Image (cartoon, rainbow, N blue to C red):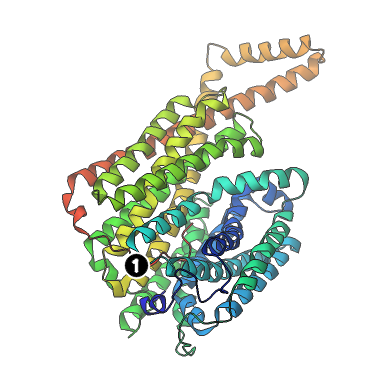
Amino acid sequence: MPISVLKKIKMSPVLPVFRSWVPVWLIRVTIFIVIVPGLLLFGLSTASAPGAAGYYGIEPADVQYSMIAYYAAVAGFFALERRFFVFTATREYFLICVILTVITSYVCFHTHSLPVLFTFRFLQGMCNCMSTSICITLIFGSLHSERAREIGYSVFYGMLLCITPVSTIITAPILDAWDFNVLYKFIIFAYLPGTAMLLIIMNNVRLSKKVPLYRLDFYSFFLYSCLLCSLGYILLYGEQYYWFQDQRIIWNTIACTALMALLIFRQLHLKRPYLDIAVFKSRNFNIGVLLIVTLYIVRGALGMTSQYFASVLGLDPRNIGYLMIANIGGIALGVLVSSRLILLRRPMRLIWMYGFFLLLVFHTWMWFLFSTQADSSTFVIPLIIQGLGTGMLMAPIIIYMISSVPPAMAGSASAMGVFFRFTGFCGSISLINYFQLRHKTIHINRFQDQLSGVDGIAGDRLATYAKALTAKGVAPDQSAKIARGLLSRTIDAQASLRTMMDYYLFISIILIVILLVIALFPYLNRTRINLMSSQPSPIGI
């Protein structure tokens, strides 16, 4: 949001945009209730990928792409959304956002068509960008001191980090009783309390002078959104379709390259660019880009941990959600520590090294903990450490990126930050797909070769399984078939474990390299942190 808009918002101690009888604490609680359903919309696709795939009759990768379409809409619409925000009165704008979100959720609740699902998930991302923009503008307009703004930054990005575990906790009981599409109905009803409360306590005022909707750069929005969707498609489906051996990947790569060239050319020749490419002239902004992409790739490994809990240990979503409470607690603690360190003016390098080192501890520890049998309580402390590391890194890196450019470019820096978080998110999915499809196949073939060797290990294991089944009363011919299935399941579990260990070793190497980069470049501390000249991007999952 432009700084001139924020300066016109007077909200202390009682906000004029709200009714005079409303206390500040009620305003902030209401905004929190409003913002949570929008954040949960993103996490729906991760709540139960098998459940979504089964209900819609699609592949698990298609479920992930619906999430990418949502994210692409948020990143693509961010720069254009500010114009609509300034043009429309606050209550009307918020009401439009909620109505459109409810309509798109209702369509997703009823449809079984994949193209319709992708289209309306994209529209949901645009609506969520609008509603979240209102909420954070109201929040940060009331925070006039640097201390309050730092706490606001930390809380906001801490909420974003908690989306996945919170979604798992909330949706698990619903999925136990109903089909996947009922989650969209839940979102519709979840919007009602916060919407009603916010409309009651708000006055019908504007946050800034009305600016006509002229010279809207829909062309850049179209190019940028198509670029993001194509990039997400390549990174998600590339490994599954054997990359450039498939025409779909080839054509999407050509389209992505052409769209990027057109978008850059257009921004360089516009008087008011949609995305100001000049932000890349800042060396420290580019360092921030490297760190945020790395953080999102590393953070994505937690999804493989959840998969381990489900596929190897056999935990149901509800118990996985209970385990993730430890991760939420770690995030809250990490956010608290990082905000305190920033307020005390501790060096950014020091905060980053603490955070990345904690993530290195988590991945190294998990490498040793991976096993076919384990007590779930064993993973509580590692999950706390993972949350502590990510909580210490998210807000400091984003604050550093925005502070490394002039205040006039803060909006473009924030928009580019969303783009690189999107890129890191998709890159994490691509890397996980590579390890699961390539490395797992290698391990399965290796295990099969070992079992079928001269030692006769496979025969001995099959005989053991068959004997145990026969002792339980299973017929001999059936016990032989079941024994073969059990052996295949054992091989698959062991291959999955080795794949996860390979991936966590890979992530550990990345973290070691990043720690060395941070330690060897002392000029990273030269950026002066400025929290008063900007506010967070509307969303950055």
Residue 385's x, y, as percent? Answer: 42, 36
> For mark 1, what is the residue?
413
Residue flagged by tag 1: what amino acid is it? Ala
- Residue furthest to the front in view is 21
Residue lying at 35% horizontally and 68% vertically, measured from the top left: 534
Residue lying at 26% horizontally and 71% vertically, measured from the top left: 406
Task: Using the image, determine if residue 261 lies above or below residue 150.
Answer: below
Task: Using the image, determine if residue 421 lies above or below residue 336.
Answer: below
Determine whether, in the image, residue 197 is placed left or right of residue 415: right
Determine whether, in the image, residue 455 is placed left or right of residue 294: right
Residue lying at 42% horizontally and 50% vertically, measured from the top left: 296
Residue 407's x, y, as percent? Answer: 29, 72
Residue lying at 36% horizontally and 37% vertically, measured from the top left: 358
Determine whether, in the image, residue 418 is placed left or right of residue 405: right
Mark 1, Cα crowd under 10 Å, few <14 / some 14-19 / many 20+, is many
Comparing 439 with 80, the one in front is 80
Task: Using the image, determine if residue 209 lies above or below residue 388.
Answer: below
Residue 114's x, y, as percent? Answer: 67, 62
Comparing 299 with 251, the one in front is 299
> From this viewpoint, is residue 6 visible?
yes
Determine the image quadrant of residue 109. Answer: bottom right
Dividing the image into 4 quarters, which one contains the N terminus? Answer: bottom left
What is the count of numbered marks? 1
